[in-house]
Image (tube, rainbow, N blue to C red):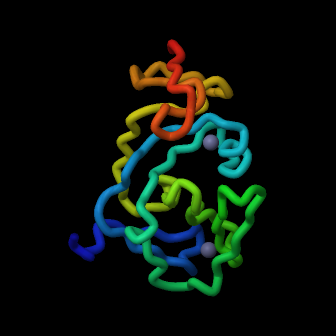
Amino acid sequence: MSNENTYQGKCFCGAVELAFSGEPEMMAYCHCDSCRHWAASPISSFTLWKPDSLRVTSGADNIATYSKTPQSLRKWCKQCGGHLFTEHPDMGLTDVPAAVINGFTFKPAIHVNYQETVLPLKDGLPKFKDLPKQAGGSGEELSE
Ligand SMILES: [Zn+2]
Ligand SMILES: [Zn+2]
């Protein structure tokens, strides 16, 4: 395992900076109501990382946390309100919006929670009604 930084990221104002090592475990789109409201967007483009792949390199004291449920600790910058990442302690993964990572090439593999979509997309990727089986879902896929 190398500790070399592969990517850097920052909040909207730049007061908080992040560094990543390695590559995400998964990249996907989520269509669920929670993601849409938190992201203020019809679709969320997320990357999942092992928690130790992500470090806060500056501005840690500017980070605030919002938890609607214990499954998601949502981190944002107190200076600008920009989102940073969401810790999922039960999953052992940290969700980082693809747009937070500088110059990152987003290569989504699947769509999740497609039953809630408000932005149907015909991109040929698998569309899970809720989540894949290995993520605790039904594994059921919907057609485009
Ligand atoms: Zn900020
Ligand atoms: Zn979601």
Please provide percent x and percent y for residue 141. Answer: 50, 19
Q: Is residue 62 left or right of residue 46?
A: right
Please provide percent x and percent y for residue 83. Answer: 62, 63
Q: Is residue 35 left or right of residue 2?
A: right
Residue drawn at (65%, 73%) of the image: 77
Residue 79 found in image quarter: bottom right
Please provide percent x and percent y for residue 108. Answer: 40, 39
Q: Is residue 16 above or below residue 81?
A: below
| Residue 96 appears anywhere in the view | no
Q: Is residue 80 above or below residue 141?
A: below
Q: Is residue 132 left or right of residue 41?
A: left
Residue drawn at (45%, 53%) of the image: 48
Residue 6 found in image quarter: bottom left
Please provide percent x and percent y for residue 120. Answer: 58, 22
Q: Is residue 60 above or below residue 30?
A: below
Which residue sits furthest right? Answer: 68
Q: Is residue 19 above or below residue 38?
A: below
Ligand 2's quadrant:
top right
